[in-house]
Amino acid sequence: MIYLEIFWVFFIANFMGYGGGPSIIPLIEHEVVTSFEWLTGYEFAEVLAMGNALPGPIAVKMAAFIGSSQAGFLGASVAIFATVAPSLVMMLALMGLLTRYKDAPQIKRLTQYIRPTIAVLLADIALRNFISTWNGVGWVHLLILGGGALVCLTKLKAHPALVVLGALIYGALLLG
């Protein structure tokens, strides 16, 4: 039964998550934390942080970790397959239609209307992670890490991977 639940969580989240990884994170979080209670909100935030620190698609990394934590290697395999299956099926089925109608006003409006929804979902998870970090490591470390990341990304034009690496090193040395 656990394999079916794992498949369902990741398949539905990825099927409904228009826009890729960032848009499905709140969907996965709801199922994993609220519906099935496999992880706490704090644990989910930790998985999200580690998933962002590693290379590759965030959804696949999160699926592998969560599936593995619930049902071992087979659980991870089921979760990964469920994560990529919706995109694979839809890409194969809709490739011709999208190519033919890519300039249609209805398709352009669909994209314009879905963007604000995704932005709100991302803002919600960012706010909850901000509060969790504030409560977890305190405002001083939050300001140092957040302000440092902002300066590195906007003023120094540092690659995001270097910013994440710097935050990992900071956390390991000062927060570990």
Image (tube, rainbow, N blue to C red):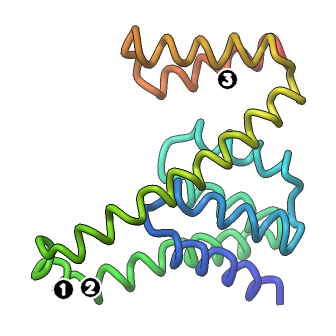
The residue type indicated by label 2 comes to: Leu
The residue that label 2 is drawn on is 94
Residue 41 shown left or right of residue 100 in the figure: right
Q: Nearer the viewer, residue 75 or 145?
A: 145
- Relative to 110, say whether 142 is above or below: above
Q: Is residue 7 above or below residue 138?
A: below
* Residue in the foreground of this view, choosing between 127 and 49: 127
According to the picture, the residue beneath numbered tag 3 turns out to be: 168
Question: In x, y percent, where is residue 134?
Answer: 83, 26
Q: Quadrant of the N terminus?
A: bottom right
Q: Going by the image, does 50 lie left or right of 110?
A: right
Whichever of labels 3 and 1 marks the residue nearer the N terminus, that label is 1
In x, y percent, where is residue 33? 83, 63
70 lies left or right of 156: right
Helix, strand or loop for disc 3: helix
Instruction: Pick the quarter of the image with the C terminus.
Output: top right
Disc 1 designates what residue? Answer: 97
Task: Determine whether the residue tagged by mark 1 lies in a helix, strand or loop.
Answer: helix
